[in-house]
Amino acid sequence: MSTSLEPVSDDVEANDNIHENQYLTFLLGDEEYGVDILRVQEIRGWDSVTTIPNAPAFIKGVINLRGTIVSILDLRERFGIESVDYNELTVVVVLRVKGEGKDRIMGVVVDAVSEVYHIAENDLKDPPDLGYAINMDYMKGMATVDNKMVSILDIDQLMSLKDIDDATESGGKAEA
Amino acid sequence: MSIDMSQFHEAFFEESFEGLEIMESELLTLDVGEGDEEIINTIFRAAHSIKGGAGTFGFMNVSEFTHVMETLLDEMRDGSREVTQFAVDSLLESVDVLRTMLESARDNTEVDEDMVAARYAVLNGILKDKSSDSSAKEDAGASLVEASVDKPIAEGWQISFIPHTDLLMAGNDPVRMFRALSELGELSAKVDYSNLQPFTELAPEDLYLSWLLTLTGGVSQADIEEVFEWVEDDCDLTITPLDVSVQNEQASVAEPDTIVREPVISNESVKEEVPEISVVDNAPVTKKPAVKPKKATESASIRVGIDKVDEIINLVGELVITQSMLDQVGEDLEANAEAVSANVDSGSQKTNADILLRLSKGLAQLERNTRELQDGVMRIRMLPISFVFSRMPRLVHDLSSKLNKKIELLVSGEETELDKTVMENIGDPLVHLVRNALDHGIETPDIRLAAGKPEVGTLSLNAYHQGGNVIIEIKDDGAGINKAKVRTKAIEKGVISETDYLTDDEINHLIFAPGFSTAEVVSDVSGRGVGMDVVKTSINKLGGRVVVESEEGKGSVFTIRLPLTLAILDGQLVTVGSESYVIPLIAIIESLQIDRAQINAVAGKAEVYKLRDEYIPIIRARAVFGLEDKKTDLHESLMVIVEVDGAPVGIIVDDLQGQQQVVIKSLETNYRKVETMSGATILGDGTVALIWDVNGMVNVHKKKLNNGVIKA
C-alpha cells in the first residue's frame, strides 16, 4: 500500500492528491452511507442515553464516553427516514467533527456497520440535484463499489451546530 | 537571529508581572530611613530581570524605563542614597507605569507617552537632584529622557571588552558577539593575552583574554550595547566613540550613570529637603490618570509547586501497586475457576474466600488511592489566596493617604488555597469591598477620636477553609452601616416601600441592591452605586455568597463564602420524568411537600405558592422540559425552593433522591449550550446526569409561559 507510507492526516481535503481514501460504510435500511475512516474514533453498541430537555428529536441525548460527555444523533431521524426500534445490531459510530473553531466528538446511531472501502478520489462523483427534498450539503459525493451505490457524507456539514441550533429553536415551538 | 521570539512573550509577561508584584510588596515593607539592604536587593533583582527580559524581547521603552528605576535602587542599595518616603512612593508609582507599559506591550496598544515622560521626569528628578530648585530639576529630567531614548550614532567606536574569567561558564561566546558586531559595521579586533596562564595552570573553562575592538560605520551605541546585553554583568565594557570632536558631547549623554550618580554622592546634605518640595511639585503629575487599566486576561498556564507534582507521582505509584495487586487477585481467581471447571481440586473453596478478602481489601485501597489522586490533581489548580491579598497593602496604602485616614491592615490566612479560576474572578470584588470599607467604613482620625476609638482604624482580611468552602472575611472597625440612612435611601430609590418592615439584617443586605449607594459625596474611590450589586453578582457567578454583619459605631464584617473549586459541586439529585438531574445545593433554600390550600393561580396562568408570609412562583420542571404532565392537582407534590436573582422560586420535581458531590463536566465541549443546564456529571453507575441552571429554568419557563406553551 502506497498510502500507508503517507503521513496520516485527519483532513480529507489535504489528501486530495492521494489516489485513494478509505471510507467506513454503514446501513440505514437498504441504503449505504460512507464516512471518511480517519474521522471515525470508535464503534460501539447502542446503550441507553440521558435525554436532553428541549433538544431536537434527532439528538437522542448524551452518553458517558470514558468520562467525556458525548451527544448522540440518530441519523434516521436526521434524514427524516422512518425510525426503527434499536436492536442488538444497532451501533453508534463515534466521529470527530470539525467546525466552528473546535473539534467535537459526536456519535451517530445507524442500523449496522457495513464495510471499509477504498475509493479513488476521481471515482467519487458529485451527487445529482435531487431537488429540495434532500439537502445536498450533507453529501460529499457518490461512488459505486461492487455494483452497490454508496453515498459519502460530509459529517462536518451533517452535524454542524447551526443545524442543531435551528432545530432546537423550532423544536421548542413544535412541541407547543 | 531567526528564532521567533514571540513564543516566549507569554512567559516573559507572566514573569514580569510577578516581578512587579514582588517589587510592589517589597516596596511597601521598605522602611523609610534605614532601608533594609536585603529588601532593596530583592526589588533590584526583580527590576533587573524585567529590564533584561524587556531588552531581549525588544520592548526598549520598558527596559529603558526600568533602567532608570534600577539606577535609583542601585544607589539605595549601595547606601549612597537614603530611602525617603518620596522615593518609595515614586518607585511605587513607577511600578504602576511599568505595569501599564507592559500591558500595552502585551496587548499591542499605545502607551500613554505623557504619563511615561512624566514619570521619567520625576525619577530623573530624584536622581539628578542636587538643588531644591524643582523646576530646573524637571527640565534636567526631561533632557535626560531624550538622551536615553536617542542613543547617539558615531562614525566609529572603540570597544574595550575585558571579560571576567567566568564569562564562558554562563554559555556566552565572545566569537559570536564579534560576529554580530561585524554585521553592524567593519570590525577589527586586537586581542590582549597578557593574562593567559601558563599551559600547566590553564583552566580550560576560564577566559583569560581581553579585546580591544574597533568598529567603524554608522552604528548606534544602542546596537552595540545590545550585542553585549547578556554579558554586561560579566565583563568590563567601555564603549567610546572614535571621533574625537564629538567625544565630549557623547560622553555626557552616552553614560547617564555617571552623570546621575556623581551629583548625588556629592550632595548628600541637601537630599533630605528635596522630597517635601517634590511631593507638592509633582502632585498634578501623579494624579494624571493612567491609561485605562485593562482587565487582566486569564492566563492559560499555571505554575505548580514541585511538591504537588511529587505528591501526584507518589499517588500514581501507589495506584500502580494497587493495580498489580488486583491483577494478581484476578489471576488467582481465574486459576481457581479453571481448577473448578476441570474438577481437580477440592480445597479451592477456602482459597476463594481468601482471594475475595484480598479483593475487597484491594478495592478499598483503590478507592482511597483514587480519592487521594483526585484531591491531588485538584490541588494543582489551587493557589494560595495571597495572590489576591498581596494587592491589598498597596491599595490600603494609596487610599488611606488619599482619604486622609489612618488605617492598619491585618492580613491572615494568606496561605489558604483556592482554585485558580475562582481566584482570578474574586480579585475585583475583593478590591471593591476593601475600597468600600476604607471609604465608607473607617472614619477619619478626628471622628474616630471623638467616638472614643483609637485614631488608627483597623481593616482585617482573613481567609480560611470551612468544609468544602473557602471563607474570606473583610472586617473593619469603622462606623458600620447606618441603618436609618440605608432605609431612607432604599425608599427614595424605590428598592423598598415605606411600609415595608425589614429586620436589621435585611436592611444591611439592601446595600447589595442594584443602584444603591449611601455615600453623600460620590468620590472616585467608591460611591457610584454600581459597586455592591456587582460584587454580589460576581460572587454568585462563582457559586459563592456574600453576607454582611454590621453594628453601628462598631464596624462591619463582610463574609464571602466560595466553593473550593469550580470543578466539583455539592448537588441534590432529583428525578423528573425518566431522568435524574442534579440541582446545585448552593441554589437550594429548602424542599417541601405542597399543601393544596397554599396554591393559587394568577390570571389563570401562572401558579403561585404561599410560603409562610411570601408568595413564590411555581415552575413545573416537566413543563419546562416539554414532558407530558398529567398532574392537575399538585397536592403532595415535591417542590424544591431555589434562589433565583435573590428571590425564591419553587420548582416541582417528581422525586427527591440523595445529595452527593459531583464532578462538573462541560456539555459544550462536544455539544452546545443547553439553556436549562449548566453542565453534566457522571453518576456512580456511569450514566450521565445533567446539572440544572436554575436561572435558565426560570427563563425557559417564562418564555414558554409567554408563548402560551404552558397553561396552568
Image (cartoon, rainbow, N blue to C red):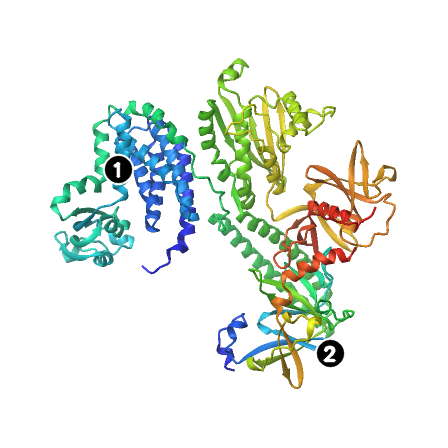
Q: Nearer the viewer, residue B176 or B290?
A: B290
Judged left or right of residue B2, residue B563 is right
Q: Amino acid at mark 2?
A: Asp
Q: Position of residue B530 (x, y in %)?
A: 58, 34
Q: How many marks?
A: 2
Q: Nearer the viewer, residue A111 or A157?
A: A157
Q: Residues within 10 Å of mark 2 (few under 14, many from 20)?
A: few
Between label 1 and label 2, give the one nearer the viewer.
1
Whether residue A64 is visible here, answered yes or no, is no
Q: Position of residue A105 (x, y in %)?
A: 62, 63
Q: Which residue is mark 2?
A: A30
Cα separation, mark 1 vs mark 2, equals: 85 Å
Judged left or right of residue B413, residue B327 is right
- Report the residue at 61% width, 54% height from top: B370
Q: Position of residue B669 (x, y in %)?
A: 61, 57
Q: Which residue is mark 1?
A: B144
Q: Amino acid at mark 1?
A: Leu
